Image: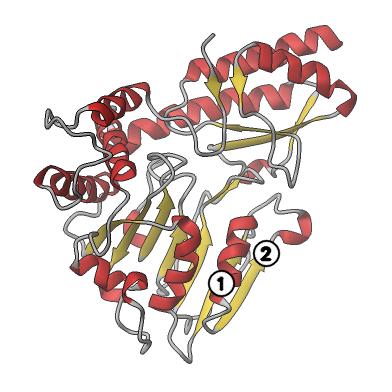
Amino acid sequence: MKKHNFSAGPSILPQEVFEKASQAVLDFNNSGLSILEISHRSKDFVAVMEEARILALELLGLQGKGYQALFLSGGASLEFVRVPYNLLTENGKAAYLDTGTWAAGAIKEAKRFGETNVIASSKADNYTYIPKDYSIPANADYFHCTSNNTIFGTQMHSFPETDVPVVCDMSSDIFSRELDFSKFSLIYAGAQKNMGPAGTTLVVVKEDILGKTGREIPGILDYAQHIAKESMYNTPPVFAVYTSLLTLQWLKNKGGIAAMEKLNDKKAALLYNEIDRNPLFTGTAHTEDRSKMNVTFLLKDEAHTEQFDRLWKEAGISGLNGHRSVGGYRASIYNAMPVESVQLLVDIMQEFEKKVL
C-alpha cells in the first residue's frame, strides 16, 4: 500500500530525489564509490557543495547581492547559538518575536549572550496567532523571528519594515513561497522539512553584517570562518548536502519557488476548506495566521478519536498525529507533498463524517 507521509519532519521528499540518492549510495557519479564513503575534499563532492550553495542563492533571488550560502551541521538549534554569537554586540541588545516552541528556544540561547528583548509573544494564547502590533527598537543589533511554527500551525504572512537586520528561522517553510528575501540579513533552515534529510542546515547570510560584535568567536561558530572555508571548515554532512542539492534541482525544474507557492496554496486551501466545512473538526490557529505548511486541527468530540484514527491509518496515511505538547492532528504539507495525498485525507474526513452523522 502506498504511504502518504504527513510527518512534520524528517519529512517527505520527492520520489525522484529518493531514487537518485539511493543510486548514489551504491555508486556516486560512476566512481565505483558510495556517496557515503567519498572524501569531502574530492573533486566530485566539492562540485556538489559549490552547486548547492549557488543554487540556493539563485532560487532565493540573492545571487550577486552580497550574500553567502552555507551548509552547516547542528540543526537550527545550533543557529540559536551562532546567531547571537555573530550578531549581538557585547553591550548591545537583540529583539525577538516569540511565536512558538522553537522561537522560545532561540530566545533562551540568546539570553546567554546579552540583553535579549522579547518584543511580542503569543504564548499566553498557546501560540495560536502571530503578534502584529509590536515595535522593533531602532538600536537593536538584530530582530529575530520564526516564519513558520510547525507545532502550533501558524505562519508569518508579512514581515516588519525595519532598518534593523532581520534574522529569520525558516526551517519549515524555506523555498515554499515567494518573498523579497533581500529584506533578510540572515536566514537559516534545517533541511529536514522542505529541503533534504536531517543532518544539515542551510544558512544564508549577508556578509556585511558580520565582524561587528567585538567578540572572539570560536572558529566552528564563526560564520566568517565558514564562508572563508567555502562551507568546508570541518567535514560537512556529505549525504545530507547531496540530497539537498537533488531537492533544489527538483525545485528549479518544477518552476522554482513561484510554482511551489501556487501548489502549496492549492493544497492548503483544499484542506482548510474541509476543516471549516466539516462539523466534526475545528482548526487550532487563528484563521489569518494559518500555516500553509503545517495544518493543525482537532476533533470537536474526542470520543470519536479511535474511529477516525483507524480510518486514516487504514488508508495508508502516516504521521498525522499532532505534536505531543498540543495533541490533535497535524498535516504537514511541504513542497514534495502531492495534491493527491491531501485529497485522500479530505476524502477520509468526509467518509468519517458520513459514518458519524
Q: Is residue 339 above or below residue 63?
A: above
In this picture, residue 106 sits left or right of residue 31: right
Q: Position of residue 81 (x, y in %)?
A: 48, 70
Q: Quadrant of residue 215?
A: bottom left
User: Residue 136: in sight, yes or no?
Assistant: no
What residue sits 63% from the left and 65% below the top? 133
- Visible residue check, residue 333: yes
Residue type at numbered disc 1: Glu
For label 2, the SS is strand
Question: Which residue is tagged 1?
Answer: 109
Q: Residue at x 60, y 78 (%)?
A: 117
Determine whether, in the image, residue 306 is placed left or right of residue 85.
right
Mark 1–mark 2 Cα distance, whole angstroms, equals 17 Å
Q: Which mark is residue 121?
A: 2
Residue 240 higher or lower than 341, as above or below: below
Q: Could you say which is closer to the camera, residue 288 or residue 155? A: 155
**In this view of the protein, which residue sits in the foreground, 189 or 313?**
313
**Mark 1 surroundings within 10 Å by alpha-carbon count, few (fewer than 14), some (14 through 19), many (20 or more):** many
Vertical relation: 16 (above or below) 142: above
Q: Residue furthest bottom?
A: 91
Residue 227 at x, y percent in the picture: 23, 66
Quarter holding the N terminus is: top right
Secondary structure beneath label 1:
helix
Of the two numbered discs 1 and 2 on the same chain, state the one appearing first in sequence: 1
